[in-house]
Amino acid sequence: MAVRSLWIGTYPPAGIGTPPGRGEGIYRIEMDLGTGELGRPRRVVETPAPSFLAQRPDGAVLYATDESETGRVAAFRVHDEGLEPLGTASSGGSFPCHLLLDGDLLYVANYGDGALGVLHLAADGRFVPDEPQVLRHAGAGPDADRQEGPHAHFVARAPGGHVLVVDLGTDQLRRYVRTSAGLEPAGVAATLPPGTGPRHLVLAAPPAPSPAAGGVLAYLTGELDATVHVLAWDAATGTAELVQSLPASPAVPPDRRPAAAPAPSHLELDGRELVVGVRGAGALSRFTIGDDGLLTHRAHQPLPGGTPRHLAVVGDRVVVAEQVPGAVTVLDRSGAVTSSRPLASAACVLAAAADDPAGRSPGR
């Protein structure tokens, strides 16, 4: 039986925005890759509001946000008994919601104030005992409630060596370059239509690159305009040009139309398809990727719950963290649910690294 271990991050049991430190933590679940069946969730460590997780490629260290106003990041050594705390560090801002490892640096997107934190790491994965580099940004968007200021939501590395920050509050992809000291601001790579509310992106080369599509495309969710955008990335200039926009959930059956507006969150590539979690619609949206990299909507796949916060493609299935009512759910490519396990305020799914020490222990 082929088994893959999953790390699951959570919000406090009462939900996002409630006080942290109420028993939430990082969980581990085993998934049968053949059947898609999930084992019982097991809390490995209690830690406040670990809403996003990142693991070193060698599996030795796991990092977790503390998505609270004070903004912290925790590090844990992974071993066959679970997780050993290695310390915490400031995230450089408030309400950190995304982490990206880049060698000896850890980038932190702070949603609350839009700051990008740059944390230096020692060779063993611990935090270097210095204050993080903090890169702040100014700006706003037309949505007075959600875009009163910058709200960094995601960090990505792009071809050409640039680091991009997806900013929901300013409708921008902010651009940075790495230096010996950390990161340096390098302007704006793209400005989305006003009110887009960009949240998350993935970059990939189209199956058959063409002059129209360029060498690499960025697929991006607009949380506020409920849209998936496709941008052509120019590595030479570090800029991106909008080439396509589609509704994130265009094929909701009449009897399943949501009371809340669709709000796309996370998206992932699954071979020749793009999978988008759409809150409000309570579903996954699947788009076929054409030879030129452009999208055609293929399927609307309802979920047992209603709030797909995050998802991961694991083998030939999609694993979804359903924040409300609280579950980890597995679907095959047809949209059939193969397994679901209750887990309060599930927020993040991370397939364990191939060399994860905990995955090598007997009986797991």
Image (cartoon, rainbow, N blue to C red):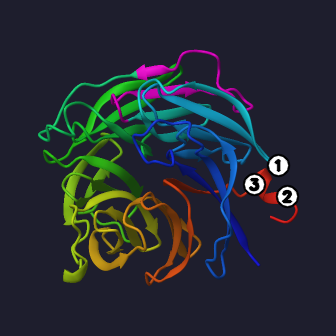
Residues rendered magenta in the picture:
111-134
Amino acid found under the numbered disc labelled 3: Asp
Decide: few, some or many residues near mark 1? Use Cα within 10 Å; few <14, some 14-19, many ≥20: few
Q: Which amino acid does label 2 sit on?
A: Ser
The label nearer to you, 2 versus 1, is 1
Badge number at residue 152: none
In the image, residue 280 lies at what x, y percent?
28, 63
**Residue on which the image places disc 3:** 355
Look at the image and say whether residue 79 sits in the magenta stretch.
no
Task: Provide the residue designation for mark 1.
Answer: 81
Residue 124 horizontal side relative to residue 160, left or right:
right
**Residues at marks 3 and 1, CA–CA distance in whole angstroms:** 15 Å
Helix, strand or loop at mark 3:
loop
Question: Closer to the camera, 10 or 162?
Answer: 10
For the residues bearing labels 2 and 1, Cβ distance under 8 angstroms: yes
Left or right? Give the position of 11 relative to 125.
left
Q: Mark 2 points at which residue?
A: 361
